[in-house]
Amino acid sequence: MIGAAAALMTTTAGRSSGFVHVPSKLLASRRQTQVRHFMAATSSQSAQLYVANISYDTDEQRLRNYFERYGKVADISLPIDRNNTTKNRGFAFLTLEDKETAEAILRDTSSSHLIDGRNVLLSLSHPRGQRNPNRFDDGTADKKRTLYTIDDTVCPSTDEEVLRKIVTKHCKSLDKYLDNSPIAAHTEAAFLEVKRYAEKFFPDGAIPKHSSPGSSDEPGLILDSGVGTGRSSRMLGEQHPKDLIIGVDRSLARLSKNDDATAASEDNDDFFVQVVEGQPNVLLVRAELGSFWRLIIEESWEVKSQYLLYPNPYPKPRRLKSRFYAHPIFPVLLSIGTDIIVRSNWAGYLTEFAASANIVSDYNKAMPITYADKPILSSRLLTDGPQAVVIEKEASALTLFEKKYFECGESIYELRLKRA
Ligand SMILES: C[S@@+](CC[C@H](N)C(=O)[O-])C[C@H]1O[C@@H](n2cnc3c(N)ncnc32)[C@H](O)[C@@H]1O
């Protein structure tokens, strides 16, 4: 099937591939938009902000001292960890006496809001289950303007100790989990096709391996995990023309969304590997990520970057273990990529992802985590973020989810993990 270039390019024509990070002028303009919507939509005098990514050691007084430079703080609600009453749960609600103070805080782009070494994230707070009127210019019932925001009012953050126990247990019992989880047949077949293609793609058939890693400007591998319809892989393919981009998703329906030739079915066992038309450096692959990551480890492939863009967040506490960072496969995921880039509209997801990565790194330092008798995490992963990402224009949105969030003014965040 490989080489059967199909009509997968339809959504990509004429786009620009750039995006920028904050802090920048763009963050200023985004905050101005937030402020404008907020001022138009809020009638009462007081205003509430949601503050995320707070250091667990920050106390109420510290928050008050910081925010009172902008105006009067009427109330601070800083939930405390049930098991460790000296620590907070990483988020707070800040009630300001007047809207102007909230406006001044959101408008302040002179620096990031750094409190106790953490760049805290601010957004307008809204009651649970309600639309956030602050995000919209007018009161019209536009269906695009659904509320997508996930914050602690939608799903409370996970208790730090609970997360530590779960992730530590997964590190300890990784071998057992893998022994009981066979590699999916269609993933194995797809991986073999990818390998054959990669051997043709890289000069002299030399797929980058841990034993002989290429330099950063030599052609390398980029993995786009959970690619959906493939938009991000196409864009990454344009941004990194020398690298081989592998976009992986388990959903045939999503992967072949733009492909007239493929009758997609979720429950057949067919494998699917496709070269994107006009982009020989981009493959779209139907595979189970858990299995695909394992096969990459077995082959010792060196992956430059792994992208996880808008992974399914499971925003219910009882689904915690379905999220990648609390799933048994997490140490395996973390072993793929010199850089790991995760984006979500849920800052709390990324904060917990980073916390879990630190737990795995700590565990690995004391007791190296192995797969097939090989240590899989050579060094600690340094976390950077989460921080807000600003999209300049619709065409710059890396994925369809990102495009949707851009269209309705939803905030999006990025976490980067880098090998020390
Ligand atoms: C929320 S969608 C995001 C898709 C795309 N990245 C975007 O932003 O438009 C998450 C994607 O991850 C895929 N996915 C989740 N878990 C997976 C797994 N274990 N193996 C393969 N794909 C998975 C889903 O099929 C889905 O397409």
Image (cartoon, rainbow, N blue to C red):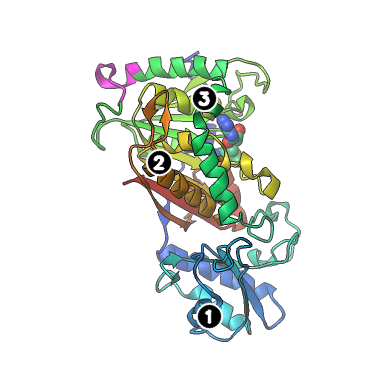
Asked if the beta carbon under badge 1 is closer than 8 A to the nearest atom of ligand 1, the reply is no
Q: Which residues are magenta?
A: 199-208
| The stretch drawn in magenta includes residue 90 | no
Spatial separation of the CA atoms under disc 1 and disc 2: 36 Å
Which image quadrant for residue 202? Answer: top left
Q: Residues within 10 Å of mark 1 (few under 14, many from 20)?
A: few
- Of labels 3 and 1, earlier in sequence is 1
Spatial separation of the CA atoms under disc 3 and disc 2: 21 Å
Q: Are marks 1 and 2 in contact (CB under 8 Å)?
A: no
| Residue at disc 1, secondary structure | helix
Q: Nearer the viewer, residue 139 or 114?
A: 114
Disc 3 residue type?
A: Ser
Front of the two marks 3 and 1: 1
Residue 364, numbered label: 2
The residue carrying mark 1 is: 61
Disc 2 residue type?
A: Asn
